[in-house]
């Protein structure tokens, strides 16, 4: 019968229920947020003359000691305390006596957990943004070296048109920038303080929610208490934002896996970030990008899990909501280590420009350029130009060469309107550099894009 809420009960709870009901083993991760929240709440209560200055001092000192005990491993996390809120308050009261029992005036665990968890998520939004910026910086370092490195751009995983490697990396820079914007906008939208909502309806005590909001670094106070104690949109948003970011990471990872295969050999991952096989001595495996691809799955799982927990919950707080935390903790920790290791793997990988260039001489990548030449220089309608180019491709296949190496005489046999200036159009390099439209792959346009991302990161 040592529960804080045991007044209306005549028998103690079964230990089975304690095990089932408790969140203390995982929500203890929020101890800093919880203690800071309590200090802010007590400070406000004292300002409003609900607590005396002496009681406030006792509470602050007591909480400092609890924090010390937690950090030095002396604190006993007990399943029977149910959650960290009650575990900490109980220990506080054991240390300071009756003043500890006043801390929960005008507060409920419902607004307490809402404030702790929201602050954790808000902090993680910004930390993930910082880690994303570091990753973008590393990608930029590689990209700046490869604005002239040609590789086959693909659609349907088939060679399509020549692009440069920096342009390819620029696609990922665009994705990661959008990811950053998503975390940031979530942060702005959810930066409201739940403290003072109490159980669901507010409190008759003369509290000042603005004081606690300011002390805890929130932008403002939430509008409606009933919503605030049951809202977990902020948690769903970080799960969605991490999921989308991991989806981008997994696409890049898939390419790193492919590129490090014998079939591609576009890159080689460093020894430091590769693994071996227990049976095949020759193997060097890209475990890092594979695991990044795989970990994306568990993050999606957490998003689906919480969406399902929240679905059809009546207002306001329901115990179901306690299931919100583990998935978010796991997704956040997955995101953090994923961003860090991807950055290191990219930083240390060896790029192999000559293999990329060799690959772009396979598959007649400048075929579109020949068609464009026929349209631009010979005034041939595009459909006809497409057909003539098809014949030139067939001739190259017959000669077992790439279209970029075909001799003028063969082209003129196909159509006599073709003249020598066509050869410039057929070269893979000019094909890449011909794509000068905004956002295109030409070296010049690519450099503009890299500059854009550099400025973006500098301004932040
Ligand atoms: N451990 C609970 C959770 O994580 C804290 C809030 C419990 N509130 C309550 N009235 N049972 O959701």
Image (cartoon, grey):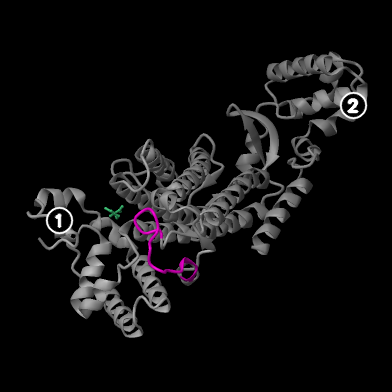
Q: Is residue 72 visible?
A: no
Instruction: In the rendered view, tell whether residue 188 sits above or below residue 94.
Output: above
Label 1 SS? helix
Q: Which residue occupies 72% across, 54% down?
A: 452
Nearer the N terminus, badge 2 or badge 1? 1
Which residue position holds label 1? 8
Name the foreground residue: 303 vs 163. Answer: 303
Q: Which residues are magenta?
A: 197-211
Q: Is any part of residue 116 visible from this angle?
A: yes
- Residue that appears at 36% across and 84% down: 53
In-image side of 168 versus 96 (left or right): right
The residue at the point 30 percent across, 67 percent down is 104
- Of 109 and 376, nearer the camera is 109
Q: Locate residue 71, reporting x and y percent.
A: 28, 73
Near mark 2 (Cα within 10 A), the count class, few <14, some 14-19 or many ≥20, is few
> Is 24 rendered above or below residue 263?
below
The answer to whether marks 2 and 1 mark residues whose Cβ atoms lie closer than 8 Å is no
> Left of 350 or right of it: where is 310?
left
Point out residue 167 in the picture as x, y percentages from the top left corner. Answer: 68, 44
* Dot 1 crowding, Cα within 10 Å, few <14, some 14–19, many 20+: few
Please identify the residue farthest to the bottom as the structure is shown. 54
Q: From the image, tell me which residue sits under label 2.
A: 376
């Amino acid at each position: 019968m040592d529960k804080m809420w045991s007044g209306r009960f005549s028998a103690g709870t079964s230990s089975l229920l304690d095990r089932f009901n408790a969140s203390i083993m995982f929500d203890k991760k929020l101890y800093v947020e919880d203690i800071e929240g309590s200090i802010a709440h007590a400070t406000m209560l004292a300002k409003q003359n609900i607590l005396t200055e002496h009681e406030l001092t006792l509470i602050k000192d007591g909480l400092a000691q609890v924090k010390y005990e937690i950090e030095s491993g002396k604190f006993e996390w007990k399943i029977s305390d149910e959650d960290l809120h009650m575990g900490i308050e109980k220990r506080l009261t054991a240390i300071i006596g009756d003043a500890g029992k006043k801390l929960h005036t005008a507060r409920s665990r419902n607004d307490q957990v809402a404030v702790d968890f929201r602050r954790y998520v808000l902090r993680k939004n910004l930390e993930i943004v910082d880690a994303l910026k570091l990753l973008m910086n590393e990608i930029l370092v590689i990209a700046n070296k490869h604005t002239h490195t040609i590789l086959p751009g693909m659609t349907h995983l088939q060679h399509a048109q020549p692009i440069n490697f920096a342009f390819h990396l620029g696609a990922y820079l665009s994705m990661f920038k959008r990811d950053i914007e998503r975390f940031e906008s979530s942060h702005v939208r959810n930066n409201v303080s739940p403290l003072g909502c109490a159980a669901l309806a507010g409190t008759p005590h003369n509290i000042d929610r603005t004081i606690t909001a300011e002390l805890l670094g929130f932008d403002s106070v939430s509008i409606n208490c009933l919503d605030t104690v049951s809202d977990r949109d902020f948690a769903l948003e970080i799960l969605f934002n991490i999921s989308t970011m991991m989806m981008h990471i997994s696409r890049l990872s898939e390419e790193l896996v492919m590129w490090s295969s014998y079939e591609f050999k576009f890159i080689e991952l460093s020894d430091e970030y590769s693994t071996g096989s227990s049976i095949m001595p020759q193997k060097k495996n890209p475990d890092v990008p594979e695991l990044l691809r795989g970990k994306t799955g568990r993050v999606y799982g957490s998003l689906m899990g919480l969406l399902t927990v929240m679905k059809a919950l009546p207002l306001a707080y329901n115990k179901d909501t306690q299931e919100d935390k583990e998935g978010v903790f796991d997704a956040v920790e997955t995101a953090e280590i994923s961003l860090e290791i991807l950055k290191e793997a990219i930083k240390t990988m060896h790029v192999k420009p000559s293999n990329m260039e060799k690959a772009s001489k396979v598959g007649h990548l400048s075929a579109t350029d020949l068609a464009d030449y026929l349209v631009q220089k010979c005034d041939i309608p595009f459909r006809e130009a497409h057909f003539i180019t098809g014949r030139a491709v067939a001739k190259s296949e017959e000669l077992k060469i790439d279209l970029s190496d075909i001799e003028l005489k063969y082209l003129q046999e196909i159509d006599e309107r073709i003249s020598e200036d066509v050869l410039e159009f057929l070269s893979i390099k000019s094909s890449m550099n011909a794509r000068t439209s905004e956002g295109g792959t030409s070296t010049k346009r690519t450099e503009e894009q890299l500059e854009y991302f550099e400025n973006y990161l500098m301004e932040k």
